[in-house]
Image (tube, helix red, strand yellow):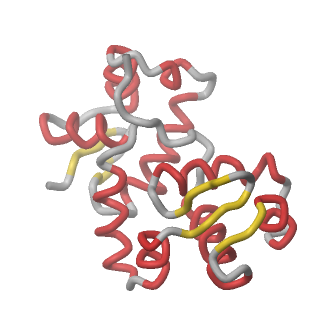
Amino acid sequence: MPGLPFMPLDARFADVLGLIDTLANEFKGQADIFMIAKEMESDIDDLIPALNAAVYLGFVEVKGGDVKITNEGKEFLNAKISDRKKILRQKLLNLEPFHTAYNLGLRKPFTIDDLIEELNEKGYVEAREPGIRHLLEILLAEWGVFAGMLKRRGDVYIAIP
């Protein structure tokens, strides 16, 4: 049985940042999800992956349809870029596929197929999603490389200790 939460495959860093920024600056830290979607000129269905990612990262919490920015979310939003990368790195190590990718990359350079195989062995059904290779490439590049935990060379990834 898988142990760690899995980052939504369609979660984009810019969307998460936009969500917590909108929440903090337009709604004083708390608002109904539908109001946030309206303010961001986004469909609620398009906002859900960013919302789930923000929850997994500990940047927001959801209670009864209201989304509230956490202290960690405020800290992240107000941090310099270099500090954001450090915060994000620590958070991503507790989420899949980053946890597995990082540990795999510490042992040896790996490909997306290696990562998929490892995630399958751990029982993550997300690893069987249609288009998983492309989705993982985007996730690793947008999140893992930005956070300074992974480096990509061609089709191979390595972990940065």
**Left or right of 58: which side holds 38?**
right
Q: What residue is drawn where x is 25% and y is 43%? A: 102
- The image quadrant that residue 106 belongs to is top left
Q: Position of residue 46 (x, y in %)?
A: 77, 50
Report the front residue among 24 and 45.
24
Q: Residue at x 67, y 83 (%)?
A: 28
Q: Quadrant of the C terminus?
A: bottom left
Q: In this rendering, would 132 be left or right of 98? A: right
The residue shown at (31%, 22%) is 118
Closest to the observer, 67 or 54: 67
109 versus 65 height, above or below: above
Q: Where residue 120 sits: x, y (%)?
A: 39, 17
Q: Residue at x 61, y 66 (%)?
A: 68
| 25 shown above or below 136 | below
Q: Position of residue 100 (x, y in %)?
A: 29, 34
Residue 140's spot in the image, x, y percent? 42, 47
Of residue 45 and residue 55, the one placed in the foreground of this image is 55
Q: Residue furthest front?
A: 64
Instruction: Please state, as top left, top right, bottom left or bottom right, where the N terminus lies in the image.
Output: top left
Left or right: where does residue 138 sit relative to residue 160? right
The count of marks equals 0
Compared to 71, does 55 lie above or below?
above
The answer to whether 38 is drawn above or below residue 93 in the figure is below
- Left or right, 121 with reference to 65: left
